[in-house]
Image (spheres, rainbow, N blue to C red):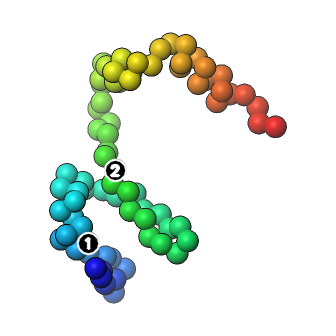
């Protein structure tokens, strides 16, 4: 499939491609080895509640020890 770049540097994705991502409005875009890579992303609302975050932590089985270990790992000095 081909996509043409417009004079305003915009690309239109072919319908066949868009059908594969019906609920996707945004894509993260990067370039690697002269290839354009589009990754679908979901935007999280700013007003996501603390309760929602806690529910997700429970669903993922993340423990307080996991969080403490992650903080220690992130704070350790790089050599």
Q: Residue drawn 22% across and 59% down? A: 20
Instruction: Please tell me how crowded label 2 is: few (under 14), some (14-19), or many (20+) other residues with Cα within 10 Å.
Output: few
Image spot of residue 34 (x, y percent): 52, 75
Image spot of residue 47 (x, y percent): 29, 32
Above or below residue 31? Residue 69 is above
| Image quarter of residue 60 | top left
Image spot of residue 36 (x, y percent): 44, 70
Q: Judge from the rendering whether residue 59 lies leftward or rightward of residue 66; answer left or right.
A: left
Q: Residue drawn 32% across and 77% down? A: 10
Q: Secondary structure at mark 2?
A: strand
Q: Residue drawn 76% across and 31% down? A: 77
Image spot of residue 32 (x, y percent): 53, 67
Q: Distance between the Cα atoms at labels 1 and 2?
A: 16 Å
In the displayed image of the protein, which residue is found farthest to the bottom?
A: 7
- Seen from the viewer's position, the closer of residues 68 and 15 is 15
Where's the N terminus, which quadrant? bottom left
Q: Residue drawn 72% across and 28% down? A: 76
In the displayed image of the protein, which residue is found farthest to the right?
A: 79
Whichever of labels 1 and 2 marks the residue nearer the N terminus, that label is: 1
Instruction: Please tell me how crowded label 1 is: few (under 14), some (14-19), or many (20+) other residues with Cα within 10 Å.
Output: few
Q: Can residue 50 be spotted in the picture?
A: no
Above or below residue 28? Residue 47 is above
Q: How many marks?
A: 2
| Image quarter of residue 46 | top left
Whether the residues at callouts 1 and 2 have beta carbons within 8 Å, the answer is: no
Q: Which residue is mark 2?
A: 41
Q: Secondary structure at mark 1?
A: loop
Where's the C terminus, which quadrant? top right
Q: Which residue is mark 1?
A: 13
Q: Can residue 9 be spotted in the picture?
A: yes
Q: Judge from the rendering whether residue 29 lies leftward or rightward of residue 11; answer left or right.
A: right
| Image quarter of residue 43 | top left
């Amino acid at each position: 499939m081909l996509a043409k770049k417009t004079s305003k540097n915009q690309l239109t994705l072919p319908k066949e491609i868009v059908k594969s991502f019906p609920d996707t409005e945004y894509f993260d875009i990067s370039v690697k080895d002269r290839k354009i890579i589009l990754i679908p992303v979901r935007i999280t609302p700013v007003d996501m509640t603390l309760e929602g975050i806690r529910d997700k932590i429970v669903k993922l089985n993340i423990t307080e020890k996991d969080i403490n270990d992650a903080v220690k790992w992130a704070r350790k000095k790089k050599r």
